[in-house]
Image: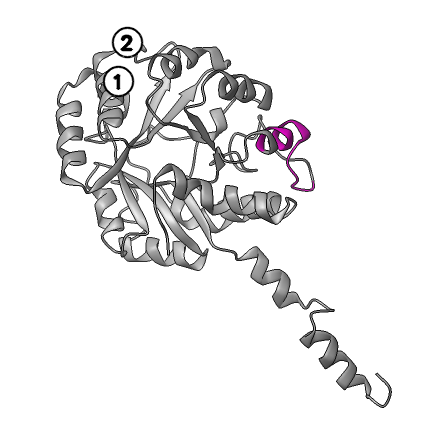
Amino acid sequence: MKGLNYFQVIYSLFVFGLIFLPGTIMAAENSNIADVHLHYTWDQQGETSPQDAIKILKKNNVVFGIVSGTPPELALELSNQTDGWLKAIFSPYLTPAHRMDWFADKNVVTRARTGLKSGQYHGIGEVHLIAGLGPRLTNPVLTGLIDLAIEYDVPFLVHIETSSYKYFLPLCKKYSKARFLLAHAGGLLDAENISALMQACNNVWVEFSARDSLRYIDSAIVDDKGRLLPGWLALIKRYPNRFMIGSDPVWPVDNRHQWDTPDTGWLKVDEYLAFHRTWLSYLPEKLARRIRLENARGLFRDRGK
């Protein structure tokens, strides 16, 4: 570069990609993502409008998303704000109180069939299965919903609260044609449990929503630098096509049964997704892209743009 002054040298390096400016790093951090665990509920309406929720997602470069609602039609208030990149799934919680006893209301299956038949819903969930509290894995409302998911060929988002993968094992084995998406990577479950479950049932996909530094803090998936722990890293490398991310916009998390307290979870989506972007940034780009975007589109059979 004989004869070039300092500024010409810097310009040349920049043009040929030999140096990286902060904007380059920022662009990588802001890569397009899919968020497969979104809610829009009755107690969020007063805090975040549908328009504001969409702005939050766009700000975070979410280009594909899955949203449920309580009641279920609230999910449509968000999905209808987009040109199809945000898809609603049918929640069995027909009213705020249904979260506790949805499995006792046979009308849930009828309503779910109507919703799926309309073409407005592209999955079922989030469905909470709480060991010791209900429902039983043979409950007719639960099994009826799984049958619908198979019939309409849509994913079934399930939340389990248990200390072992063996709790869910009979369900994924019996319904081998269902496509189960396991919320929160099992919540309390560690990588060893999830590995055993995924090995036993190839119809189980896993998403990492709420496994951040603010929730499920006793079952961390990352170290103090934000990198995936070795067990989780080995697992996603073993099953690179079966993991994805989500935000689960819920906050606070310690008063979910205080019905007079608003849910401000949408105001924390930035933090929730930033957590995922951190550990994803340590992965090889091809693997990171699969988890960040491609696997979600594949599971929900979205062609994207």
SS of the residue at dot 1? helix
Which dot marks residue 304?
Answer: none
**Circle 1 residues within 10 Å: few <14, some 14–19, many ≥20:** many
Amino acid on which disc 2 is placed: Thr
Does residue 199 show up magenta in the picture?
no
**Circle 2 residues within 10 Å: few <14, some 14–19, many ≥20:** few
Give x and y (percent) for residue 202: 45, 22
Which residue is at 64% across, 46% downward?
284
Amino acid on which disc 1 is placed: Leu
Which residue is at 15% across, 29% downward?
113
Which dot marks residue 138?
Answer: 2
Which dot marks residue 142?
Answer: 1
Q: Which residues are magenta?
A: 225-236
Mark 2 to mark 1 CA distance (whole Å)? 7 Å
In this view of the protein, which residue sits in the foreground, 294 or 55?
294
Give x and y (percent) for residue 131: 40, 12
Q: Is residue 51 something that shows in the picture?
A: yes
Picture mark count:
2
Residue 240 found in image quarter? top right
